[in-house]
Image: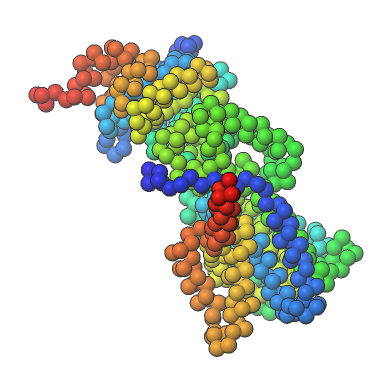
Amino acid sequence: MHNATHENKSMADNVVLKIDDLSIAFGGLKAVDALTFDIKEKEIFGLIGPNGAGKTTAFNCITQFYKPDRGIVQFRTNKGEVENLVGKKPHEIIRKGLVRTFQNVELIRELSVIDNVLVGSHIEFHASVLSQIFKLPKARKEEAKFRQQAEEVLRYMGLYDIKDQLVAGQPYGVLKKIELARTLMCEPKLIILDEPAAGLNDSETLALTAIIREIRDKYNCAILLVEHDMRFVTDLCDRICAISFGKLLAVGTPQEIQANEQVQTAYLGKGDE
Amino acid sequence: MNKQENKQAVKVKSNSPYKQYLLFGLLLLLIPALVKMGVIKYSFLTIIASILIYAIVALGVNLLVGYSGLVSLGTAGFMGMGTYLAAYFTSDLNLPFEISLVISVAVPMIIGVLTGLVSLRIEGYYLAIATLAISEILRKVFVEFDVVTNGFSGKDADYPKLLGTFELNRDSTFMLIVVILVAVMFITHNFINSYTGRALSTMRGSEAAAQAMGINIYRYRLLSFAVAVGYAALGGVLYIHFIKYTYPNAWTLLFSLNMLAVIIIGGVRSIPGTILGSFIVFGVPDLILKNLPVIGEIDGLAYVFNGVLIIIVILLYPAGLIQFWHNLKMKIAKGRKGKEGNNA
């Protein structure tokens, strides 16, 4: 935290997230090694790399699920201030305007679809426990307000008809959508998506590309995503960061990344090694 | 999650159950009259009252286990503490029932929070160990601290005197218990359907999701544990004012385990299921089995009954016996739909 203050000035006005020298090791394995890149406001930014390159670990370091050994994660919060996220608790991160999804879909099976989405606005609720158990006007008003907002989000995502069904038993593609809907409840500045297209078929992936673009425009936020599907990433992203064995290979536009020799080597391997 | 793809999507009932709770309460209020008319045995009123008191305590346990994913083995200790405090405040200090009630619930809650502050920081499972220890310590205190607790001989209290004027008798105390049970059912229903309830369910289902959505797991674990302890202590206060007697060996680990049996047999994450479970675990042995010829003579029958029942329920009805009722309702609904379809 101590180095946040003097680093603040180095972050350009249009940058929402800047990670610098981010490193974490598990035992002897450097999962993320001196990773540095930044994301501009309203940018769709892709993080790619072969299996085990450290993409999800990098996400976990940014969202503070893991404590990085080194480096800083500067974030322009929804209040417009620049803060270093390193050292904050995982549950404090969403309050800054940074929200994420998970590779393995983390939804609550026993709750309905709309209740799962409502969990996304947890930080916006303020009614006291007493107000909630006696259903006093404040709690009731708050609940109604966010339930309506959740309904709007669900309608937008095409999930309105199943809003009262349990999450348990929904198909995988729907689960992915519900998780995405949940991130839209907290007026995010940056949404982090961990393999949003995994397990989706071609038409679903195509639809997802459109949805993510729309979300960026509608919610005025930046999007950082990890994905294996190269076509999906090159179609969607403004810029891409390629990593391998935790190390940065290249950052650039999809065309630049595709043409990059190092990236090709990492993905396809080289004959002589 | 892929495995569930083929399962049919289940619709959640969203209509509020207040009317059912009220109806249930009204039916219970008839019991003292039925006893007077001789339809129900005199001793059954005591058994049913204990079942209802245990149901209140079990609702707290269900909140903890079913909604928050925590296990407490200290229910007995905290409920016992409620009985002793209420007995001491009303019998020895002559405090009004209402004030005694508030203190007797608040003090165990404070001790519960202190226990939680230490044990919940690490992992959810540590709460089970810590509460087991606290409960045994409390039981030792019930024995040793005889200035207040009267040691092994136990402690007496009277039926409550409301607002310092209305002295209740056996029947009206029973009614008070019914009213409080229904109130607790209402409150619990509201609680689990609030944003706090969703937060509890979320941290039970996925700690990662809870943290990512800004839910402070430590805080919510503490909250749900404090509420569960509060319910246990409230049950204790009602217990001492109806049974009128408490002694150390009533509050052993076995009692806490029985509370877990109530929600497993009745229905985890279900308010009606909890009530049903309380009736089965505490009622069936006393009300039915003991009155059967031959079987009724066996010592420790209740333990055998509960043990066997838990195994059967876990194997066949993992969501508890309340599932019976839900299945029945679904069948009726389907039957109706089928008929409508035929008519059209």
How far from the left and from the top, in percent, is residue A149? Answer: 61, 29
Q: Is residue A83 left or right of residue B271?
A: left
How far from the left and from the top, in percent, is residue A182? Answer: 52, 32
Q: Quadrant of residue A111?
A: top right
Does A214 sit above or below residue A175? above
Residue drawn 53% across the image and 20% down it: A219
Q: Is residue A247 left or right of residue B187?
A: left
* Rendered-image quadrant of the C terminus of chain A: top left
- Towards the viewer: A203 or A235: A203
Does A176 sit above or below residue B107? above
Residue drawn 45% across the image and 37% down it: A175
* Residue B201 appears in the figure: no
Residue drawn 35% across the image and 17% down it: A235
How far from the left and from the top, in percent, is residue B207? Answer: 48, 43
* Residue A215 appears in the figure: yes
Does A59 sit above or below residue B45? above
Q: Quadrant of residue B14?
A: top right
How far from the left and from the top, in percent, is residue B159? Answer: 80, 70
Name the residue at the left extreme: A272
